Image (cartoon, grey):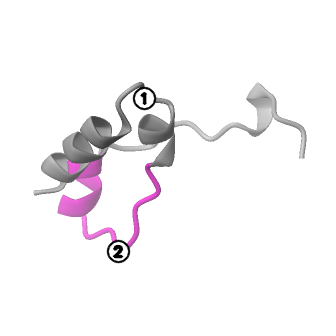
Amino acid sequence: MENNISNYQKQETYVRDAVKNGADLLVCSSPIRKSKNRKEALMRTLDEMY
């Protein structure tokens, strides 16, 4: 698959909102993968969940 803007998924909602609305599964790899400090990005995501 070609990597261009037409097939890139955008963020649909925030983690906290998704959990609040009953999401069973979250895909949030881009903010973590693109971060210079992945551990910190993961911790921010986990903090937002609770």
Judge from the rendering whether residue 29 lies leftward or rightward of residue 46; answer left or right.
Answer: right
* Residue type (three-letter) at the residue carrying disc 1: Ser
Labels in figure, total: 2
Give the distance between the C-alpha atoms of the residues marked 1 and 2, in whole angstroms: 24 Å
Question: Dividing the picture into quarters, in which one does residue 18 lie?
Answer: bottom left
Q: Which residue is mark 1?
A: 35
Q: Is residue 35 above or below residue 50?
A: above
Local crowd size for mark 2, using a 10 Å CA cut-off: few (<14), some (14–19), many (≥20): few
Determine the secondary structure under disc 1: loop
Give the mark toward the camera: 1 or 2.
Answer: 1
Image location (x, y in percent) of residue 38: 37, 38
Question: Dividing the picture into quarters, in which one does residue 14 lie?
Answer: top left
Q: What numbered label is drawn on residue 7? A: none
Any magenta on residue 47? Answer: no
Image location (x, y in percent) of residue 37: 35, 30
Image location (x, y in percent) of residue 49: 18, 55
* Circle nearer the N terminus (1, 2): 2
* Residue type (three-letter) at the residue carrying disc 2: Asp
Region rendered in magenta = 15-28
Q: Is residue 36 above or below residue 21?
A: above
Image location (x, y in percent) of residue 11: 47, 38
**Quadrant in which the C terminus is drawn:** bottom left
Of 23 and 29, nearer the camera is 29
Judge from the rendering whether residue 26 lies leftward or rightward of residue 44; answer left or right.
Answer: right
Q: Which residue is mark 2?
A: 24
Determine the secondary structure under disc 2: loop
Q: Residue at 89% x, 47% y: name it.
A: 1
Any magenta on residue 20? Answer: yes
Local crowd size for mark 1, using a 10 Å CA cut-off: few (<14), some (14–19), many (≥20): few
Of 4 and 34, nearer the camera is 34
Question: Dividing the picture into quarters, in which one does residue 36 lie?
Answer: top left
